[in-house]
Image (spheres, rainbow, N blue to C red):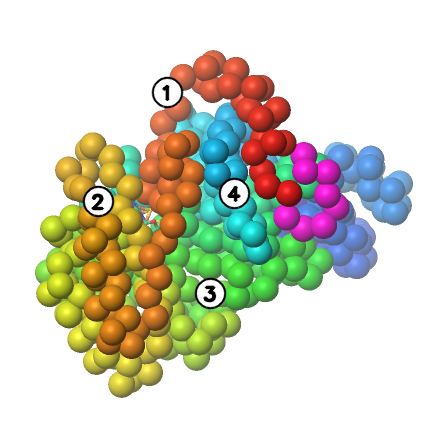
């Protein structure tokens, strides 16, 4: 087996090059070819010595996960499904907006946390993705979009680790992938524009703060331990008070001066005025110890097995107003890609009909050029 160079951050690649008897700076050139130019054939890397290219042919390859399908929403959102083997797939979603392009990346096939309102959670855990499989989603999407939109500048400005899986339960693969995103010789993304979203793996939030502090989103969903235990089972291990303390510690290294709290609005479950009141009380209590946060209310994307319903818009707005009146910055997330099941929590990994999916891919390649705004 040869080495997949997508598995390595720049330091890892330098060590690999040294192992081939090459100077470390060769790694920088190689890294730029891969991540900045999207190259996967060593023969194309014209400024690398022929001897190095020959060694690379023998010992290395550059390969992302096999693509199964591509779906394009009427709003320009694109969802890619990648094969992770054993009949499972993961999804990557590109969300174009006027001032940015956001890629939503998966970190695991399935998820072991098992949140009640999440279809990935209902599916169970299949396996961790490797670093190559995580960064490969960005590598593929960025260079695919540049080629198909016929642009040479960067298309993806933001990454959110909000696809399938709990990124902080796949920490060792996640961190090198984040480093590649941030590296000036890689994607050169700002720490503020790379967001890790977590259901609250407390020790790993602390480690992330010291190893690779990027923007942090915490999936809160409930103001009390009793309710959160029920919605996000991980809360039984890391209850709210511990979670809040970790968020406060994270802020000392964070690239932004607030943590984003995500709150999925579930009809009659966590969307009542008393929930908003307890949420304000929770946050105000911890604000005295240094917590600074913003709220992002997510309209629940229903799926039958959950037995849950989306909160009515009036409840969402009333909830948002109660938080805002208490001085908490609160936004309501726009749902994107609804028509292609690319919205939060709709990402499910079982591939039902591969042939059909492959046929549709061919048609959709053509549609895409028209669907993505200039
Ligand atoms: N595991 C991480 C990141 C992936 S989930 C986490 O839980 O934070 C990304 C976001 O989508 C989380 O805030 C999650 O709570 C939310 N989400 C999950 N299922 C959803 C659904 N059915 N409708 C709306 N949001 C959902
Ligand atoms: Fe896992 Fe996040 Fe879904 Fe919970 S919401 S099951 S942590 S992917």
Marks 4/1 in contact by CB < 8 Å: the verdict is no
Mark earlier in primary sequence (4, 3): 4
Gap in Å between the C-alphas at discs 3 and 2?
27 Å
Mark earlier in primary sequence (4, 2): 4
Mark 1 neighbour class, 10 Å CA radius: few under 14, some 14 to 19, many 20 or more: few
Mark earlier in primary sequence (4, 1): 4
Seen from the viewer's position, the closer of residues 327 and 142 is: 327
Mark earlier in primary sequence (1, 2): 2
User: Which of the 4 image quadrants contains residue 120?
Assistant: top left
Mark 3 neighbour class, 10 Å CA radius: few under 14, some 14 to 19, many 20 or more: many
Which residues fall within the magenta stretch?
148-155
Dot in front, 4 or 3 = 4
Secondary structure under tag 1 reads loop
- 146 vs 372, left or right, is right
Gap in Å between the C-alphas at discs 1 and 2?
26 Å
Q: Which mark is residue 94?
A: 4
Mark 2 neighbour class, 10 Å CA radius: few under 14, some 14 to 19, many 20 or more: many
Q: Which mark is residue 310?
A: 2
Secondary structure under tag 4 reads strand
Seen from the viewer's position, the closer of residues 158 and 16 is: 158
Gap in Å between the C-alphas at discs 4 and 2?
24 Å
Marks 1/2 in contact by CB < 8 Å: the verdict is no
Tell me the residue that label 1 is attached to.
352
Secondary structure under tag 3 reads strand
Q: Which mark is residue 215?
A: 3
């Amino acid at each position: 087996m040869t080495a997949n160079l997508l598995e390595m951050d720049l330091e890892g690649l330098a060590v690999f090059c040294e192992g081939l008897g090459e100077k470390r700076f060769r790694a920088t050139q190689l890294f730029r070819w891969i991540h900045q130019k999207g190259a996967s054939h060593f023969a194309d890397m014209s400024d690398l010595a022929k001897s190095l290219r020959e060694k690379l042919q023998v010992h290395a390859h550059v390969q992302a996960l096999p693509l199964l399908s591509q779906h394009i929403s009427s709003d320009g959102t694109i969802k890619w499904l990648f094969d992770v083997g054993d009949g499972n797939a993961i999804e990557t979603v590109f969300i174009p907006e006027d001032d940015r392009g956001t890629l939503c990346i998966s970190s695991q096939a399935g998820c072991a946390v098992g949140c009640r309102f999440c279809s990935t959670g209902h599916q169970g855990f299949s396996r961790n993705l490797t670093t190559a499989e995580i960064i490969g989603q960005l590598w593929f999407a960025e260079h695919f979009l540049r080629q198909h939109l016929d642009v040479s500048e960067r298309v993806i400005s933001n990454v959110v680790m909000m696809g399938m899986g709990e990124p902080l339960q796949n920490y060792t693969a996640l961190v090198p992938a984040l480093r590649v995103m941030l590296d000036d010789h890689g994607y050169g993304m700002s720490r503020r524009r790379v967001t890790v979203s977590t259901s609250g793996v407390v020790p790993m939030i602390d480690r992330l703060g010291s190893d690779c502090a990027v923007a942090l989103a915490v999936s809160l969903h409930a103001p009390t331990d009793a309710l959160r235990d029920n919605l996000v089972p991980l809360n039984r291990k890391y209850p709210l008070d511990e979670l809040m303390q970790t968020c406060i510690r994270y802020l000392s290294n964070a690239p932004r001066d607030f943590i984003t709290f995500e709150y999925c609005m579930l009809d009659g479950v966590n969307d009542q005025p008393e929930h908003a009141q307890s949420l304000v009380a929770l946050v105000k209590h911890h604000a005295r110890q240094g917590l600074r946060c913003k709220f992002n209310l997510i309209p629940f994307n229903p799926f039958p097995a959950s037995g849950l319903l989306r909160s009515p818009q009036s409840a969402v707005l009333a909830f948002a107003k109660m938080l805002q009146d208490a001085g908490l910055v609160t936004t309501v997330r726009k749902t994107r890609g609804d028509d292609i099941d690319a919205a939060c929590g709709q990402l499910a990994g079982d591939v039902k009909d591969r042939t059909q999916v492959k046929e549709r891919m061919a048609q959709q390649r053509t549609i895409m050029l028209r669907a993505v705004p200039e």
